[in-house]
Image: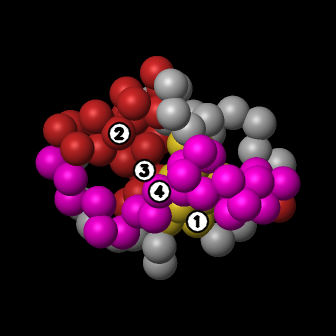
Amino acid sequence: MSVILLTKNDCPQCNQLKMFLKFGLNGKYDSDIQIVNKEANTEEFEKLTSQYGVLTLPTFIAGDDVLSKTQPTPVVAFLEKHIGKK
């Protein structure tokens, strides 16, 4: 299953999460995460934030499961649950 990551430009928390995914997890989930950036893909971003009631960024979406707590432990658990890599 693919996981969506909602982000925007000039978002310190978004940048911090991207750095964790790249360096902390060595990019092992990169091919499984679809990044939807507010400025780059406004229409899809607005559709998803409205559909899932997203109020904070960054946010992961997988099916009906939404994760806005983007500290390392919940992120790893979310990705393992929905993607399956350990």
| Residue closest to the eye, 45 or 39 | 39
For residue 18, the mark is 2
- Relative depth, front residue between 15 and 38: 38
What residue does disc 1 label? Answer: 62
Tag nearer the camera, 3 or 1: 1
Q: Is residue 17 left or right of residue 37?
A: left
| Quarter location, residue 16 | top left
> Viewed as shown, does residue 19 lie left or right of 41?
left
Find numbered disc 4 in the image and state the secondary structure of the residue it sits on.
strand
Q: Position of residue 86 (x, y in %)?
A: 24, 60
Q: Are marks 4 and 3 in contact (CB under 8 Å)?
A: no
Residue wearing tag 3:
77
Given contact means CB atoms under 8 Å apart, are the residues at marks 4 and 2 in contact?
no
Q: Is residue 13 above or below residue 36?
A: above
Amino acid type at circle 3 is Ala
Q: Residue drawn at (29%, 44%), measured in percent from left and top?
A: 21
**Which mark is first along the chain, 3 or 2?**
2
In the image, what residue occupies the spot 75% across and 45% down? 54
Question: Residue 20: where, in percent of width, then height?
Answer: 29, 36
Choose the circle earlier in sequence order: 4 or 2. 2
Q: Please, which residue is most extreme toward the bottom here?
A: 1
Q: Amino acid at mark 1?
A: Ala
CA–CA distance in space, label 2 to label 3: 16 Å
Q: Which portion, as a residue range, is magenta?
A: 26-50
| Dot in front, 4 or 1 | 4
SS category of the residue bearing label 3? helix
Counting residues from the N terminus, which is met first, the one under dot 2 or under dot 1?
A: 2
- Callout 2: helix, strand or loop? helix
Disc 2 marks which amino acid? Lys
Residue 35's label in the rendered image is: 4
How many residues crowd around disc 4 within 10 Å: few (fewer than 14), some, or many (20 or more)? some
Amino acid type, residue under disc 4 in the picture:
Ile
